[in-house]
Image: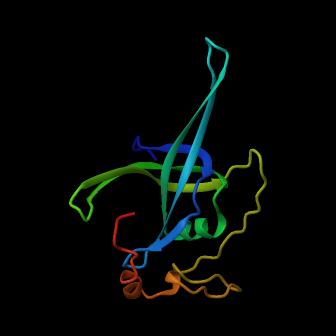
């Protein structure tokens, strides 16, 4: 990422990743990330703490892998870029938010261990060999997902 817009965060997932699909069938997952910072105040000697919260978005195969692998409370390392988007809500009010669009996500191994299993390449929404097809939006045709509330508000 040489464009100058890069960020690396280490934190805990605050809500289970939510897997959704665009009308064209593209997988996307989003979750919250809490990043804690702790430091000692030089004047008082007391420890201070602050928490920052970020929305993280990931796409395609990574979105599906994140939704299958991670849950609330997982400690992860996220690398990506900051992206701001704006929209108008149903009441006509302008809204905007800044989120982290992930290029890569991995478990933090500072206080935990992890087992990594490489997935075979597969089409989006297709189950890996030996895994049963799951019911729900992942296996819906794109035209049905579009009518099921998966494209109403930008995410």
Q: Position of residue 37 (x, y in %)?
A: 60, 34
Residue nearest the viewer, comparing 100 with 130: 100
Split into 4 quadrants, where in the image is the C terminus?
bottom left
Give the side of residue 53 with respect to residue 93, left or right: right
Residue visible at 47% across and 72% down in the picture: 20
Residue nearest the viewer, comparing 50 with 64: 50
Q: Position of residue 90 (x, y in %)?
A: 25, 65
Give the side of residue 68 with respect to residue 4, left or right: right
Q: Residue furthest front?
A: 91
Residue visible at 40% across and 82% down in the picture: 148
Q: Position of residue 97 (x, y in %)?
A: 36, 51
Give the side of residue 130 with respect to residue 9, left or right: right
Q: Residue furthest left?
A: 92
Residue nearest the viewer, comparing 104 with 64: 64
Residue visible at 59% across and 56% down in the picture: 105
- Where 115 falls versus 13 (above or below)? below
Q: Position of residue 138 (x, y in %)?
A: 52, 81
Residue visible at 74% across and 49% down in the picture: 109
């Amino acid at each position: 990422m040489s464009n100058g817009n890069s960020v690396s965060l280490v934190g805990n997932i605050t809500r289970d990743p939510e897997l959704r699909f665009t009308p064209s069938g593209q997988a996307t997952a989003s979750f919250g990330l809490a990043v804690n910072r702790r430091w000692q105040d030089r004047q008082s000697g007391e420890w201070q703490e602050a928490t920052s919260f970020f929305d993280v978005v990931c796409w395609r195969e990574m979105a599906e892998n994140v939704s299958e692998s991670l849950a609330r409370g997982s400690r992860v390392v996220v690398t990506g870029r900051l992206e701001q988007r704006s929209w108008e809500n149903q009441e006509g009010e302008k809204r905007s938010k800044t989120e982290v669009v992930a290029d890569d996500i991995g478990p933090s191994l500072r206080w935990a261990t992890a087992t990594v299993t490489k997935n075979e390449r597969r089409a989006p929404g297709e189950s890996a060999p030996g895994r049963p097809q799951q019911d729900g939006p992942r296996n819906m045709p794109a035209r049905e997902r579009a009518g099921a509330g998966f494209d109403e508000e930008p995410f």
